[in-house]
Image: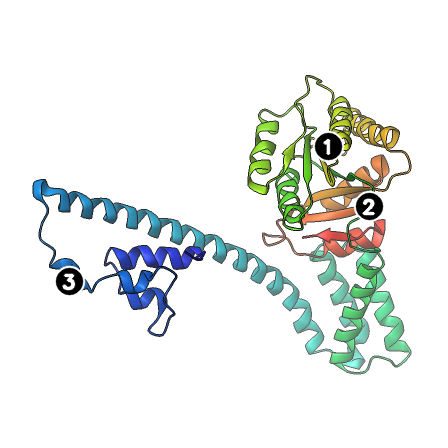
Amino acid sequence: MPILTHQQATLCVLAAVALIPTSHAFGAGAPVLAGGLRGALPPLRARRAVAPLAGGARMQDTSFFSKFARTIVEKAKADVERTKRLFNGLEGLRSEMSVIDELLSYWQLADADKTLEQLEEALIMRDFGVSTSVKICEGLAEEVKSGKIKQPKDLRNAMKAKIVEILQGGGDPTLLLDDEKPAVLMMVGVNGGGKTTTVGKLSSKFAKEGKSVMLAAGDTFRAAADLQLEEWCQRAGATMAPRSNAKSPAAVMYDAIDASISSGTDVLIADTSGRLHTNANLMAELQKVKGVFDKKMPGKPKEILLVVDSTQGQNVLNQARGFNEAVGITGVVLTKLDGTSKGGVVVSIVDELKVPVKFI
């Protein structure tokens, strides 16, 4: 039996209980599935003509399938709603930037100074930050003065080129995966940014690439943090680092490094606990965790990824500054970019810290 999409499976069930015609599930010219599923369904009239079963079993059977069908329909509706929210969020991001596009469309050379001032304000409002917005607009002003920009499309293309130049200045966005086992990824960030979820998604990515993955639960404070990570291990086909009685995140990582080396694991992902970048004690604890990796694996390249919630706007830049100063981040992972984020914070982070955005 081939694997069906969720939508196809839903339509198959609905067709089986005669809530919709079978043709709606596969279309008139749809191929027959393995096992002859489509051909195996008798005509609707024939199914209705079946003699009633003794003891009201037919009524119970119909009731069961009706309830089952309603459950599947509700699940399908929920999936559709989640998909709509995703695209609506991205549409909101595009509409935010369309204001700038409209401003550039009606630009005239005689109004260059006024337009660039409005453009600078628009970029700031969209979380590009003051310094990055000024940098972009000053560069555009120079090109206007030199005669390189004469038409609205020239200004639009020049602005895009400036933004691309800033983003490319962050460096190589590919992961630093050392050939010597295990490659190390250390996930850092504030509470609720999406670190553990990102760990699960990265684990699934590596597993599909044929790599063995071990996850280390460095969050020794949050209730059931290790259980959450175990669930991701089961979903992604990863291995959980052996449980440790140590209460210190640094001690947990020490044991995880030994376990990953002895087992020949390809990738070790350390899920550190969420912490505020303004809390000196917690940042010192994070430095100890990094110190364990430096001591156990001297000279080995390590990926230190800062996971940030994009909806927090310019506060994300402050987080990046704090974590970069403490442990030296090598890349940024942006989560929830399909929410209320205006998107410009991506550019300001790369512009100031010169680190690439590695995942969105």
Classify residue 257 by image quadrant.
Answer: top right
In the image, farthest residue toward the front: 35
Residue 208 image position (x, y, % from top left): 63, 50
Residue 132 location in percent, x, y? 81, 57
Residue 342 as seen in the image, left or right of residue 85: right
Q: Tell me if residue 310 can be seen.
A: no
Compared across the picture, whether 114 is left or right of 308 comes to right
Which residue is at 78% across, 66% downward?
117
Quadrant assignment, res 44: bottom left
Callout 1 secondary element? helix
* Disc number placed over residue 308 in the picture, else none: none
Element class at badge 2: loop
Toward the viewer: 148 or 303?
Answer: 303
Q: Residue at label 1?
A: 263
Residue to which mark 2 is pinned? 179
Q: Which residue is drawn at 10% across and 42% down?
A: 56
- Depth order, front residue of 171/6: 6
Q: Name the residue under label 3.
A: 46
Q: Earlier in the sequence, mark 3 or mark 1?
A: 3
Q: Name the secondary structure under disc 3.
A: helix
User: Upstream in the sequence, badge 3 or badge 2?
Assistant: 3
Q: Quick one: label 1, few (<14), some, or many (20+) residues within 10 Å? A: few
